[in-house]
Image: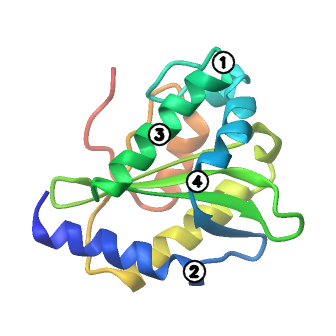
Amino acid sequence: MNHFLNAQLQRLRSAQLDWATPNYCFRSFVKADVHPLYLAAQNPGFNKFLLWNKPDSIEAAMVQVKKLLREESLNQSVTFSIVTKERGAWAGFLRWIPHQDGLAISFWLHPDFWGTGASRELVDSVFGIVFETTDIIKLFAFIQPANLPTIRLAKNKNMTMAMVLD
């Protein structure tokens, strides 16, 4: 990874404590997030667009959580949990991954938060945060073609389709 992107990840990590939306805040992703992640991944809709298979046990989910944390420790990505301000409930997670000359954003919401406007609220906030906090000028999102709600959201944010994933 180039020095520029490395520095941008560090800036995002440092600024995370100030991040919030009207209904959600971000905190560091930790091993304890394995339980809500495992439960969410049991829903086929949640798991459908993850780039790893549905964990068949809490131990299998822990393998994925440890992988995410290891990537973060090597400064290959930054992962945050999304939690509700009202109850502190785990709502999903957000990842920043260096990609070419920008950052790829990926986030997954727990099915309990689908259709609530959470995606739009989070994306609006996250786009503002990345452009205010860093010198990044390009954001990428890898979206499966069947994930029509996310494609609509990306188009509403004026993102341009660069390629179609298989």
Q: Is residue 97 visible?
A: no
Q: Which residue is mark 2?
A: 17
Q: Are marks 1 and 2 in contact (CB under 8 Å)?
A: no
Residue at the image point whose x is 41% and y is 38% from the top:
67
Q: CA distance from mark 4 to mark 1?
A: 18 Å
The quadrant in which residue 88 appears is bottom right
Question: Which sits in the foreground, 113 or 79?
Answer: 79
The spot of residue 83 in percent (x, y) is 73, 61
Amino acid type at mark 2? Leu
Question: Which sits in the foreground, 131 or 133?
Answer: 133
Q: In the shown orientation, is residue 128 left or right of residue 139?
A: right
Amino acid type at mark 3? Lys
Secondary-structure class at tag 4: loop
Question: Which sits in the foreground, 74 or 8?
Answer: 74
Q: How has the structure been colored for display?
A: rainbow
Amino acid type at mark 4? Val
Residue at the image point whose x is 68% and y is 20% from the top:
44
Q: Which residue is mark 4?
A: 30
Mark sitting on residue 57:
1
Q: Are marks 4 and 1 in contact (CB under 8 Å)?
A: no
Q: Earlier in the sequence, mark 3 or mark 2?
A: 2
Establish if 129 lies above or below 107.
Answer: below
Secondary-structure class at tag 3: helix
